[in-house]
Amino acid sequence: MMAPTHVLAGLAGASLLVATAPEHATVGALAAAAGGVAPDLDALVGTHRRTLHSPVYGTLVAAPAVALAALAPSALTVALAAFLGAAALHAVADALEGGRELRPWERTTDRAVYSHYHGRWLRARRLVRYDGAPEDLVLAALLAVPSLAVLPGALRWLPAACLAVAVPYALVRRRIPGLVERFRARTRA
Ligand SMILES: [Zn+2]
C-alpha cells in the first residue's frame, strides 16, 4: 500500500484511544502515524521491504507493547504501542500487496516482504495489486473514516493530509516509473 494508506491504518487504530484513554489520543495518533510510515525508510537506506519490515518479529514486539499500554497507560507506553503496532501492521499489510518492483502491475516478481523469522521473502498475495491502485485508494478512504470522525481538533488534519496526498498519487501512479527513468537518463547524459 502507499504511505498514506499505512498512516491511515495506524490512525484508525489510534482512534480507539479516544474512547479508552482520551488523554493519550494525541500522542498515540502522532506515534501511529510515524510508525505507519517508518518501515518504508528502508527504501532510502537498506533493502526496501526487508531492512525495516518484519511482519512476524514486528508483531511479536508490538503485542506486548500494546498489552503494556492497556495495563499501564501513559504517554510513553501508548506512544510505544502505537508506533510499534502501526509499523508491524505495515509489514503485514505489505505481504497482502503486489511484489517489490518498479511496475508491480507487470508481476515479474512474487517477493512481497521479507520475513526475518522465516528467513525468506513472503509471497505477494496481491489483494491490493500495487501501491496507489484504485483498490488502495478505496482502502485509504475507508481507513480515514474513523480518525476523521473521532480524532480531536487539529489532529483531523492528519487523515485529511493523507487523503490529499493519496488521491493525486493514485491518479499518476502508473506514470511514475516512466518519469523516474526519463529523469535518470537525463541526469546521466
Ligand atoms: Zn512498506
Image: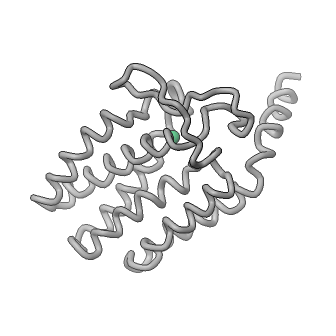
Residue 176 in the image, given as x and y percentages of width and height: 77, 43
163 relative to 169 in the view: left or right: left
Question: Is 52 rendered above or below residue 89?
Answer: above
Residue at 35% from the left image edge and 55% from the top image edge: 31
* Residue 82 placement (x, y as % from top left): 31, 54
Colour mapping: one colour
The answer to whether residue 155 is seen in the rendering is no
- The quadrant in which residue 62 appears is top left
- The residue shown at (23%, 58%) is 78
Total numbered labels placed on residues in the image: 0
Q: Tell me if residue 174 comes above or below residue 15 in the rendering.
A: above
Q: Could you say which quadrant of the image residue 20 lies in?
A: bottom left
Residue 51 sits above or below residue 88 on the image: above
Outermost residue on the top side: it is 119
Where in the figure is residue 9, as x and y percent of width and height? Answer: 45, 58
> In which quadrant is the C terminus drawn?
top right
Q: Nearer the viewer, residue 67 or 127?
A: 127
Q: Is residue 181 left or right of residue 18?
A: right
Residue drawn at (78%, 36%), measured in percent from left and top?
180
Give the quarter of the image for residue 118. Answer: top left
Look at the image and tell me whether residue 125 can be seen.
yes
